[in-house]
Image (spheres, helix red, strand yellow):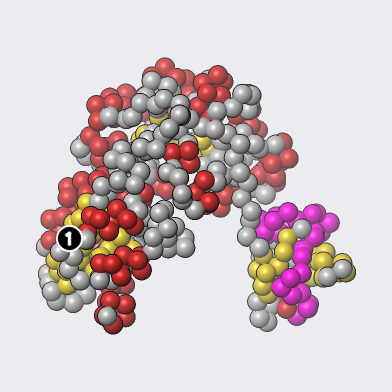
Amino acid sequence: MVAIIGVEENSIAEELGIRAGDHIIAVNGREVEDALDFRFHSAAEEIELLVQKGSDQIIFEIEKEYDENLGLQLEDLTMRSCGNRCVFCFVFQNPKGLRKTLYFKDEDYRFSFLYGHYVTLTNSTQADLDRIVEQRLTPLYVSVHATEPQLRKTLLGINFDDHLLEKIDFLIRHGIELNCQIVLCPELNDGEQLDRTIADLKTRYPGVRSIAVVPVGLTDHRKNLFPIKPVSESYALQTITEVDQRRKKLKEELGSSFVYLSDEFYIRTGLPIPPNDYYEGFYQLENGVGLTRDFLNRFQEEKNMLRAPREGLELSLLTGVLGQKVLKKYFWPDLEAIPGLKFRLHRVTNKFYGSGITISGLLVGQDIYEALKDQKLGDVIVLPPRCLNDDGIFLDDWQPADLEQKLGKPIVRFPGSFTELFKTIESYETSFSYHSR
């Protein structure tokens, strides 16, 4: 049963007298567990809707176009929790005192389909797998890390065989495509173990469409946790060399390179970001695999058309350690050449999580403030695109408004392109709160 939280005006649901506060019990005799269930079962021209209204249950027989929307707004999906204790889990590396949601470990195949979240499938039952197949929830994103059973148990912190490969085989046999992830931990799942994992997944290609290899992230708050060595620059360089050798063989065997390293490996070592053909279909952009190349591609298309929103505008771009390297190496000469515009680049060191965390997406408000409070900031401060959650809050619960107040400057989040950034500034600059102080 799923709650109705809103009904659109002039919709089929409103005409039938369905209201917020009612509950959907079933569609065509099939029980409805969540909004995803409802979306699947209501995709038909004739449906029978069983609705709970107070203490009464009412059946509505509806004729509509196959994909016509009934106008129902349903309660959000409740995310399933994860029972694993992965040795590298970021939740266990959070400092104390953060908001409760940051200590919640999610493991939900529905969010994997909807938003690209990675799941281990350890808590997926046969009923879950059947639902994935029936509702065509493809592609899914699966955290594998290792396929050797004992090592997988160690990495995931479980004491049972979760039969991962059997689950993968079931899903791909029924047409579900999977993109897999390996969080690479030095001297744990690299070397021969990495070879085994790739070999096991290779036999499932193209059902298993891609493997992303990302470096383990370690904070300064790892207390009484499984010992893991950090990824050094020399280790990253060695990994690039070894994976490139594997990719050549895979290309010959499969017609696809199949394995893709995250951008962090290349940025850390100072090696050039790979060209487009390295990433083939850019299957795992949200995992940081090809994100820099994709950004470079978009920038090359827009750079000759960029114009300052107004003459003499000064923008302060904030970035983490890795982001600074990318901007300086690939973007800075072109940005400085934009007429009538001046950029200031401010690197923010992550003191909240520790210097080992170098990506911009984990920057927090207090570190940004400490880095900027004594600096010349120009007219507008531009945040990295991924350092705020959907509610516009940093990981330490600071908000952009807090920084605006303390720094006396307007703040915008980078929207994905400089064209859109300039439009945002041009449209809203006069309404920034600091102008009224």
Question: Measured along the vertical axis of the image, is residue 99 above or below residue 139?
Answer: below
Residue placed most toward the observer, 374 or 185: 374
- Spot the residue most to the front: 97
Residue 375, percent across and down? 16, 61
Left or right, 75 with reference to 180: right
Image quarter of residue 388: bottom left
Residue count near mark 1 (Cα–Cα under 10 Å), binned few <14, some 14–19, many ≥20 = few
Q: Position of residue 322 (x, y in %)?
A: 26, 44
Identity of the residue drawn at 51% across and 35% down: 143
Q: Residue at x 25, y 40 (%)?
A: 267
Q: Is residue 399 left or right of residue 206?
A: left
Residues drawn in magenta:
15-42
Mark 1 lies on residue: 374
Residue drawn 53% across the image and 51% down it: 100
Q: Quadrant of the C terminus?
A: bottom left
Percent coordinates x, y for residue 359 in the rendering: 32, 46
Q: Nearer the viewer, residue 343 or 173?
A: 343
Residue drawn at x 65%, y 76% as measured from the top left: 8
Q: Is residue 432 above or below residue 386?
A: below
Viewport quadrant of the N terminus: bottom right
Q: Determine which quarter of the picture holds residue 153.
A: top right
Q: Nearer the viewer, residue 109 or 151?
A: 151
Instruction: Look at the numbered disc 1 and give the secondary structure of its residue.
Output: loop
Q: Is residue 110 left or right of residue 433?
A: right
Q: Look at the image and say whether residue 416 sits in the magenta stretch.
A: no
Whether 238 is drawn above or below 100: the answer is above
| Residue 294 seen from this side | no
